[in-house]
Image: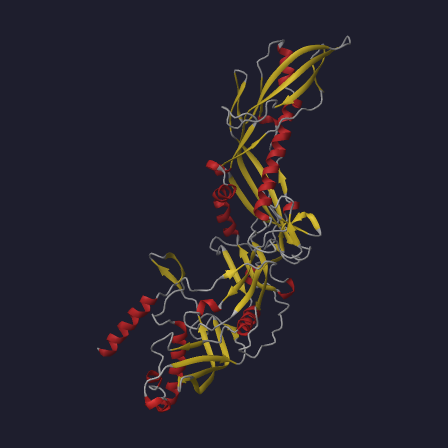
Amino acid sequence: MLSRFRHVFGVGFFLLVASCSGGGCSSCSSGCGGTTPLPGGFPKEKTIANAASVRVSRPGLDFVEKELPAIVTNVTKAPGGVLGFDIPNVDPAKTQIANIGIGKILIDPNVCPDGPDPKANPPRCHADVGLGKATFQLDAITPNAIKIRATVPLKLDDTPISAELRADPIIGGEFGLGSITLHIGYGDGDCDNGKPRVTPHALPIGITIPLVEETTAPRNGYTKIDVGNATVDLSGLSENQVRVCASCGFATDVCSAITDSGFVKGLIVGPLKSGLEGQVKSLLADQLCMAPSPALNPPCPTNTSPDAANKHCVFDSDKNKCVSTLLGTDAHVNLGGLLKSISPGTSGALDFGLAAGGAMKPFPNAAANAQGRTPNGVTLGMLGGVVPQPASKCVPQADLKIPTGIPLPDELAPTSADTATTPHLGIALAGRFLDYSFGSVYNSGLLCLGVSSEQVDLLRSGLLSIIIPSLKTLTFEQGDAAAAISTRPQAPPTVKIGAGTAADPLLSITLPKFALDFYLWHLDRFVRVFTFQADLTIPVNLQTGKDPVKNPNGGIIEHRRHQGRERQRHERRSAHG
């Protein structure tokens, strides 16, 4: 019985030492390791399909669409939530526009002859889009796209059009009628003294963004936000809200023929549509195409490079195609740095990647109704990979086989519509990916720890002799000497996923052949006195609950150190009571 107690106590003592520095258990601070980006990206051939998967449910999309006005305003950095764009100067060819009974009127127009001036009062040739007051609808549509329907306030205050007019009477010949200046606006309102006085019009806009599998190396297999094939539906931008105003100095029927002309209104609708569509596509490209990183060398992933404007990364094989932003992350992770305060010699670094792969799946794959709404959520499989960088010599290297054939979990691929209580976000990690990842951590040498009296004052032969009395006979004059403990795992860990109960933990991490080497300071050097080896299993559970301050709606419970100490003090008081 005493022997078993000593074995358990020895393992527990080591784990305590390995998790706490000499000043007591504390959180990671400036001494921790960190992550650095991978200049060329994580190697595609090292990835595991469906290593993880993510689903945003229909209630989750509802939540996002309510937050979209603030998100879009923040992303565009639009002052006051208003995004503006200018109507450029256009000088089209002369065009026949109307018949007025005595003949035809010809017009030679010049749109915005003096150029845009957004600072004029009212702004000249400048449109404002009220993103901050927009409303959005967000739907996942079949086969694999996101449809955004927005109602956006749009206003164009005053865009002058100067025109030279000529008449072509029925009796033949042409003669000049002089010139006229029209003032065009867009919005809800009318004309006032020859100028438009309008308020923003609620303009419906539809944006469809495909989420499909990239086919161009090195991003082949990853999910692509297909900006190049995104469509912008501006069919709601019509001539009905175009206000053509003029103070006519000649016959009313001639003036009316000009101001009522669909041609004149088209001179404004065209630039409005192209300007708004350009703004939307530019915004999508800026946010959804990868930008070169000046801090990396190379600044773009392998086989891609910055475009001529150094604004987006484009494929070397197709300079007109931008590299889609990775829906995930990749990085070099220095795990050994996390433990350097207690185990300075520990290495353990990994190249890590986890990003969406393949086309988006709009489960439960329902078609849109008459209003364009769907009950679908968004499910994405993830390509994941973990590679030791470099591999460690402190452990026998495990020959890890990349798992294949991992399916999407049924929980993230529902066949029926979500309910109001369905969680907004679902995340799944494949057991085989976890097992592979822990094997990579093992190969990195992270589990080769070394702790001595230099890091932990209590780690001395006097303390260890409590469980191993004979240790004191090995030191000089049987005095108290410095001690050290190191680990030498001999086989990679295995991970078992359970039900998340006390009897069946969520994760059971088994460390087979986990060896602890014990050293004592003797004759000016550390001498190994014995090795303890065992199969070690660590159960891991996540506990949820409610806290009136930190998580009143429920969530994962955070166990703080002082709570544990208070519980220990209470237990000691009970034991002494």
Q: Nearer the viewer, residue 46 or 33?
A: 33
Position in image of residue 439 (x %, y %): 55, 73
Viewer can see residue 1: no
Residue 547: give x, y in percent of width and height.
35, 59
Q: Residue furthest right?
A: 172
Q: How is the image coloured?
A: secondary structure
When asked about the image quadrant of residue 31, the answer is: bottom left
Tell me if residue 164 comes above or below residue 336 in the rendering: above
Image quadrant in which the C terminus is located: bottom left
Residue 389 percent across, percent down from the top left: 57, 68
Farthest left residue?
A: 577
Residue 448 left/right relative to 142: left
- Work out which quarter of the rendered image holds the N terminus and state it: bottom left
Whether residue 417 is situated above or below residue 431 in the rendered picture: above
Residue drawn where x is 55% and y is 77% of the image:
393
What's the residue at 68%, 17% (across, down)?
Answer: 107
Task: Name the one closer to the observer, 390 or 435.
Answer: 390
Q: Is residue 446 visible?
A: yes
477 displayed left or right of 118: left
Q: In the figure, residue 180 lies in which quadrant?
A: top right
- In this rendering, position of residue 270 left or right of residue 508: right
| Total numbered labels placed on residues in the image | 0
In the image, residue 51 sits, relative to residue 368, either above or below, namely below
Q: Position of residue 191 (x, y in %)?
A: 53, 19
Frontmost residue, 389 versus 77:
389
